[in-house]
Amino acid sequence: AEDEETGLGVTEVPWMIAMEVGERRERERMDRLARAKANGANGASDEAEGGESNSAVSSPATDDREAELEARYSELKRWVARKGGIVGVGVNVSRVVGKPGDGWGFVATDGGDGTDDGSKHGDVNTGESPTVVHPGDVVARVPIALALSHVAARTYRVDDAPVGDLLRRLFDQAPEYAMCMMLLHERFKLVHGLDSPWEPYVRTLSHVEPSVAVLRELRGTYADEARREWDARVKTAHEWITDVGCAGGLRQMCSRKPGRHGAGSGTFNRDDVRWALGVVRSRAVWIARRFGPGGGDSSSRRFPALVPLLDLLPHDGGAGGTTTLGVDNVVTVTAGSSFAPGAEVVVDRGTNSTDAEQLLAYHALAPGVNVDNAVRLNLPGAEIANAGVIRKVELLRTWRREMAMPPRGADLWRDARGLGLYGDGDEDEVRAMGDAARASAKKRRSLAALAAKGEGGRSGGAITIEEELLLTDEARDPAEAAAKAAARIGVDLRLLDGDEYDNDDDGEAYVLYSAPNPDHPGGDDPALDHHRRSLARLAAQTAAAAAYADVSGGADYSGTRRELESGNPGGSANDRDETRSGADLEARSDGGNATRAALRSARAFFERGAPPPRGLDPLDLFLLRKGRLMSACGETRDFLITAAGPSDPLMCATRVLLANETEVKALEGGGSDPHWSGDRMESASEIERLKKLGLMHEPFDAARPLSETNERAAIRRVASAATNILAGYGTTEEEDLERLGDVDPVVLGIVDDRHGDGRGVWSRDDSNPEKNASTPPGRSWPARVPGGVLASAVALRVRERRMLRGAVLALRDRAETLGALDFQVEEKERRRAERDAFERERAERIRELSRTFLEREVLASIDVDVVRPDSSSENDESSEESGIRREETTTITKTVTVRAGDDVESIVREFMAANSIDSTDAFASLKRTLLERVERGADARGVANRRVGRCAVIVPNGRKVVVAPRVGEELSDVVRGFAEAYDVPPPLVPALAARVNASLVKRASRATLLTLDVVAPDGRSELVFDVVDGEQHDLVETAREWALAESVHPGAAVQVADAAFRALPPVIVAFPVDVPGRARKTIAIRDGNEAAVRRTCEAFCEANDLGGGDATVDALVRGAMSRLNPGAVLVDADRRVREGGRAEEVGDEGAG
């Protein structure tokens, strides 16, 4: 339970009480100190505060406490010094008045030897603030071995057992949690009287939580929300330490009673982890390796560590300074600013902390403007892409609830089954029901069996079977998931048909079992009560989704500029009570048809008892697709609102959050809807090819707005978040400034003039006016906002209010300039249209290419007038009457066509025989005319049909065909057309294209041995037959493949091969080459030169894809050289393999 006023849980109360007691004691001590000063003890107190102890007149109890702290820190300093650590010249570790916590820190001194600090650098400070510490001075050096870090984890031991490897892996995963484990282990060793190597350091570590008074001041601010998130992180840290850190060999490390006899004492509880995590948050420093890539500024080489003494340096983002680990394994801190005597030394820890994070970690605010100040927004779905299966379901549930969407069907199903609304029958009961049972009852029983089996799955009952199948990519859609789930448990899928998403069509009212009555025995079971309450919440969520389906709104910008410019940014008390129009924007993610389907399903369940979907519904799949896009926006820690407006990652994520179906589809790249897990229909090579053509865009550009409507909605959403925070403050800015009193506006951070003089000098933070009067003139700068934790909380509220107001103004300016932005959805839609047009043209081109493989090219055609006798009866009668017989004729036009691959002479003879033409002159004339017509197009064909190569392919029906792309053709299009012509399965096309391309590249790289001009039987004279190295061994097969590529009559292949054989040099020696599983090949050697023989063998191996590398080539060369030199001794063995100077024979030796 939580307190309504403070929102605190019961377990947090002890921490609040401890903090209040600590603050009360500090106030009492400060009051006693002030009274002692007023009684004339200024001199003594000044002397004391300038030394190490900073002690003052106080009560015996306070003296004892401060004496104990002084003793602990004195021991710590001696321990560090013994181990090789040093504190810089002009710096001392002592008590700092007004510092939260134990009040110890680094203070600049006057050197203690009477020397002027200006002489330290050989210069003199001309009348301004004298400084002891200058930029670049060493503040402290501490060996890294004294720190609790991943370095110490290398040699860490638990009960004398080395656990360094296990602990280092934890540091790689979560360094802060691993440090908590080390810190707690060492702390409990001291609690139980055991020795610890870090005892002097661990005894100085302490941490307290903000008090109730501070929490009241933070109420309504972002810091309050950040505090709740930090508290939630304690639970996460405890679960991680328990489940991951303390598992396996590190279990003993997590015992609350370390040692060999600590079994059964239990492991770290949540309060232990809360303390340790608080110490790590406030004390850990980030160290950069000086020798890392990019030097000390390399963020990839930075690591956190708890370093003695260095953890006392406050953080200030404007102070500068470095914390580096050198090659000597010593951590060195150098100052980034100048510090006057008595000033506390501060550095920039490099944490980029917001005001809220600073206040919660250090209980103080750094002075001046915090350039890293921001408000971090938590957007639903931002972490869903990288979450685990169970976590995905939880995030989907939260997303739909926060965005006023209908509840998930699987959640409705779990609660309904938990209450037994659909029965509790199992598989055997379903099968035993028989034909007498009603179909609807059988459906209900089958559904109950499906859920019951889901409880025993790998998910342990947290999700249904269908959810598990979809989220693990074992099913691609709800229908497939339902089929696999039914098959897994042995239920007939037909019993489940029609009950997923069409509940609104049949109108059937299901007869449900009654829910258990709470007043009946067993009805008050907590599990049943949980399901009843859950169903009530889901019903309210359904009603909200139906009621607010079309709600829209806008942020209220009215009066914001006027308030800021009038000097009254906080407004009046009456203004705070007024309702801000549009401040509570109900902007939702538009799921379109998916949202409507989910709403129909939920309403059907509550109104008629229709079984809801059990897996991921379309709305879940749509949100998961959004989550993938949102993951490209950046890390969730970067979702910030600053004074300049929202960060780019926040705007990107908000755009995706509010994107509708059309926008999401455009951002994903168009085409068919991809599966939510990111699968695409195109292959990787196809996507790259389209990108090179400028026809495929990147799926999502995180830096650009989507559309004008979406951008306007995103601006309203972020502005509403800012105005909601502004509306939640319980005070005005005037009231806050009045409470802060006379705090310098520059120190407060509302006037950015911190380094207006070109240099900032830090001075002591002291409220004594006499001491301030003794400080030389110049810029003085405190280490923190004065006034304590409460004043810092008030200052945080002032800064946050001004920052958020500036963000709202920036958003208003952005909304007024939307017309000048370039929206990527419009561009992607245009590119989609261009791509669709390109794809249509490409499809037509592929169809044309496909026809070229199946249809031969027409080379020439001639219309021939064929004269035929006309034997009509009318002519016969007139001839008989006149006594004269006349033969009438009829002229018919016929077309003779010659195609590529024909024999012109055979075509003419067949034409003459078919048309009863028997004339030698006609034959010669027709043949000559056809050849002339073919010759006319030779030049054009010679240019258009130039081939880049040829590659033989065995197609699915077993035929051997040849792919021979022409110059200028796109190989992928040629292969696609080839695949369509010969029924090659589409999934194999990309691999086929890659192999054809590789074959063509290899062929083009080999030397050309011969080219022959060929006149084909079809009359073409522009054809050229070429032979490259590796193809001369089987000229007949080479000629046949050439004939297939050029559509030449098969009978000409032998003639071409004979001509090529005569044109090539004579064969000196030839011998067969046997390859297991292949036909025997014969290699022909035409040049006896040793280098030529090797080139021939290499080309032979490549052309026939023999493999084996150099060993195969060497074997062929040995065979050829032994035949060319029959009297030589043959050593039939592979070459020696030399390793480490030794020689090893590989293979068998032989002589012949």
Image (cartoon, rainbow, N blue to C red):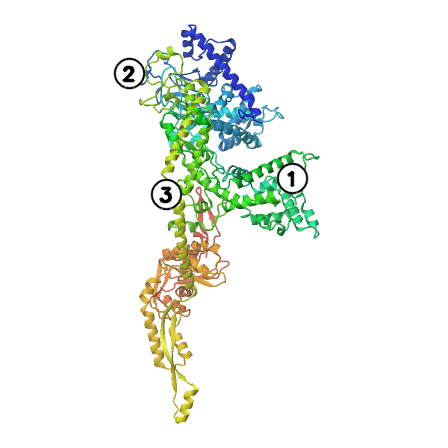
Whole-percent x and y of residue 630? Answer: 46, 40
Would you name the residue on which mark 2 appears?
126
Q: Is residue 431 left or right of residue 954?
A: right
Q: Quadrant of residue 1096?
A: bottom left
Q: In front: mark 2 or mark 1?
A: 1
- Residue positioned 50% across, 29% down in the render: 229
Question: Where residue 239 sits in the image (x, y, percent)?
Answer: 56, 31
Residue at the spot of label 1: 419
Displayed quadrant of residue 859 = bottom left
Q: Secondary structure at mark 2?
A: loop
Place of residue 958 in the rendered image (x, y in percent of width and height, measured from the top left)? 49, 62
Label 3 residue SS = loop
Q: Which residue type does callout 1 highlight? A: Leu
What amino acid is labelled 3 in the image? Answer: Asp
**Residue 32 shows in the view:** yes
- Where residue 570 sits, quadrant-wise, is top left
Residue type at tag 2:
Thr
Secondary structure, mark 1, is loop
Which residue is under mark 3? 822
Inter-mark Cα distance, 3 to 2:
56 Å
